[in-house]
Structures are given as structure tokens and as C-alpha cells.
Amino acid sequence: MSKFGGVLAVLLVPAFLVAGLIATPATAQEKMAAKKMEKAAGKVSSTVVAENEKVRVLENRFKPGALNETPPSSSTRVIHVLKGGTLLRTYTDGKTEKIEWKTGETKILGPSAQTYTTKNIGKSELALLIVVLK
């Protein structure tokens, strides 16, 4: 090995070791922050607002990052958006679909054929008023 190669190796090896030591804690901190955020986001808050033998009215609130793993309804639903946001629907086959909900908008959804989970990927809370026909 030439003198230049030896000097280069002596200088670069410690530099890479120091860089690795500095980068590792940052990566660990990022992972811990992501886990804390996911844990804080938790699940969707669902409150029964009213119910009788024909309908059930729910208020669902999705904090940023909140995940709803409840199976989709086999009933027709009327959904009114109290506070808009963005949900990411993930189907069991891995396909994803981004859904925008605008404040004041109302949608009628039929029974769901596929199973999926929904996650609030927006930066603010999403609030939906859902009327489920029994």
C-alpha cells in the first residue's frame, strides 16, 4: 500500500466510525419519536349520540395518526363531516386509497364489500357524524 493510501485509511476509518456513532442516536431518537406519536394518536374516539330500533348515530373523532381498525359497516351510512381532513384507507390486499373529507359535506355510503382500516394522515383532527341504518 502506498504512503498516500495508508494516510488516507488512517484518516477515513476514524471519520466513518465517528459519523456512525453520531448518526445512530439520531436514528434511535427518530424511531422513538415516531412510536410516541403513534401511541399518542391511538384509536378513533367513537361516541353514540342517539340510537333507536332503526338507526344509530355516532360521532367519530380521528386525532392525527389515529387508526380505526373496526370492520366496515354492512349497513348503509349517512356521513356528515363536522371537521374535515384526510384519511388513508388500507385494504386487506394492500391497496390504499386517500379520502378527502371537507367540512360541511355529507355522503351516503352503501355496505362495504371489502375489509379495510382507516388512518388520519392529516395534521388536524377529523370529526364525522355517522348515521347507521339498522
Image: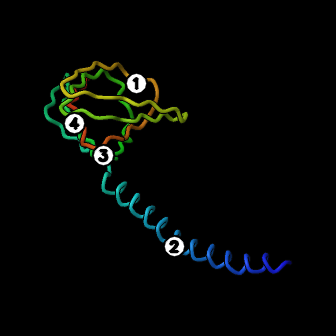
- Which is in the foreground here, disc 4 or disc 1? 4
Three-letter residue code for mark 4: Ala
Instruction: Name which of mark 3 and mark 2 comes first in the sequence.
Output: 2
Q: What is the secondary structure assignment of the residue under circle 2?
A: helix
**Where is mark 1, residue-wise?**
112
Instruction: Name which of mark 4 and mark 3 comes first in the sequence.
Output: 3
- The location of residue 57, given as percent across then percent down, is 18, 30
Residue 75 sits above or below residue 35 on the image: above
**Where is mark 4, residue-wise?**
127
Instruction: Name which of mark 4 and mark 1 comes first in the sequence.
Output: 1
Residue 24 sits above or below residue 110 on the image: below
- Residue under the point 37% across and 54% down: 38
10 Å neighbourhood of mark 2: few (<14), some, or many (≥20)? few
Three-letter residue code for mark 2: Ile
- Measured Cα–Cα span from mark 2 to mark 1: 49 Å
- Residue under the point 22% across and 36% down: 127
Instruction: Name which of mark 4 and mark 2 comes first in the sequence.
Output: 2
- Residue under the point 41% across and 38% down: 117
10 Å neighbourhood of mark 3: few (<14), some, or many (≥20)? many
- Measured Cα–Cα span from mark 4 to mark 1: 20 Å
Q: Which mark is residue 64?
A: 3
- The location of residue 83, given as percent across then percent down, is 20, 34
**Where is mark 2, residue-wise?**
22
Instruction: Name which of mark 3 and mark 1 comes first in the sequence.
Output: 3
10 Å neighbourhood of mark 1: few (<14), some, or many (≥20)? few
- Measured Cα–Cα span from mark 4 to mark 2: 42 Å
